[in-house]
Image (cartoon, helix red, strand yellow):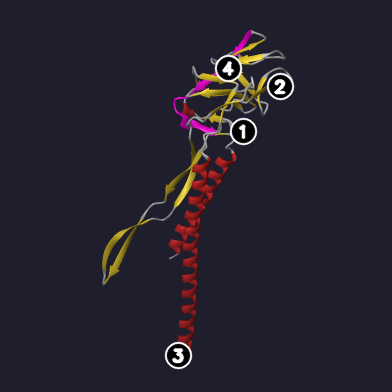
Amino acid sequence: MLRGIYTATSGMLVESMRMDVASNNLANVDTAGFQRQTAHIYPFPERAVARVHQGERRVLGTLGTGAFVDGSATSFAPGTVRTTQNPLDVAIVGAGFFAIQTPEGTRYTRDGRFTVNSSGLLTTLDGNLVRGEQGAIYVGEGEVLLNEQGEITVNGELVNKLLIVEFNDRNGLVRRGSNLFEALEMAGDPFRYRATLVPGALELANVNVVTEMVNLITIQRSYEANQKVVQSYDETLGKLVMLAALFERLASIGAN
């Protein structure tokens, strides 16, 4: 019986973590370049269930012992491109990532909301430097224009080109906050990728609000179902304890 409580409890924990992931997806539905997440769910080993009668053991089947969440997967499906008319906004069509220089090292993103800092360098909204093929991108205070090849001109003069990269295995990219990814060894070395860009536009999050809301409802119902199983086991254990106490009392009365 205790095994049933543990199994149902593990189900509640799984649904709780799935709820966190789905809620985070919904919270970032308006974040440019956000990539939807799904939880990685794995089952615990199954156990054989047997019936023993008059010394004979007969296997009836297997019994699941619950599940657990180990990390999450990222969906790199493209999001909708929306025009903003901001000359420093840029969206990637298809594969590719912007290379961003942070204090922790190079990171990668699909978020093309850029700005210019007080030193005249092109940065993300968090102040991290956007990398070009020739290093940091200095634009100063002139008129900045980007074209579909990622070339950056200031007052009509070409100054740099956005560094767009891709990886052999995107599963090697892990989130590091602020809509940035870090490339682990399994991702392979980043290589330059000839992507098509849309200047004056942004790629929206690849999150479908309706789908996520349906997921939240399903998760909530599953959580409640496991919760009722735990409550049912708890009530049954309570009754067993009361019966055991009653039998013990009757046995003591009979002994006297």
Kindly state the secondary structure of the residue where label 1 is placed. Answer: loop
**Comes first in the chain, label 2 or label 3:** 2
Residue annotated with mark 1: 178
- The span from disc 2 to disc 4 (Cα, nearest Å) is 17 Å
| Contact? badges 1 and 3 (CB < 8 Å) | no
Point out which mark residue 93 bears: none
Label 3 neighbour load within 10 Å: few <14, some 14-19, many 20+: few
Point out which mark residue 162 bears: 4
- The span from disc 4 to disc 1 (Cα, nearest Å) is 20 Å
Residue annotated with mark 3: 254
Q: Amino acid at mark 1?
A: Ser
Residue under the point 51% across and 51% down: 217
Decide whether residue 19 is among the magenta residues.
no
| Contact? badges 4 and 3 (CB < 8 Å) | no
Q: Amino acid at mark 4?
A: Leu
| Contact? badges 2 and 4 (CB < 8 Å) | no
Q: Residue furthest top?
A: 157
Residue 107 shows in this picture: no
- The span from disc 1 to disc 3 (Cα, nearest Å) is 72 Å
Residue annotated with mark 2: 117
Residue under the point 56% across and 24% down: 91
Kindly state the secondary structure of the residue where label 3 is placed. Answer: helix
Q: Amino acid at mark 3?
A: Gly
Q: Amino acid at mark 2?
A: Asn
Kindly state the secondary structure of the residue where label 4 is placed. Answer: loop
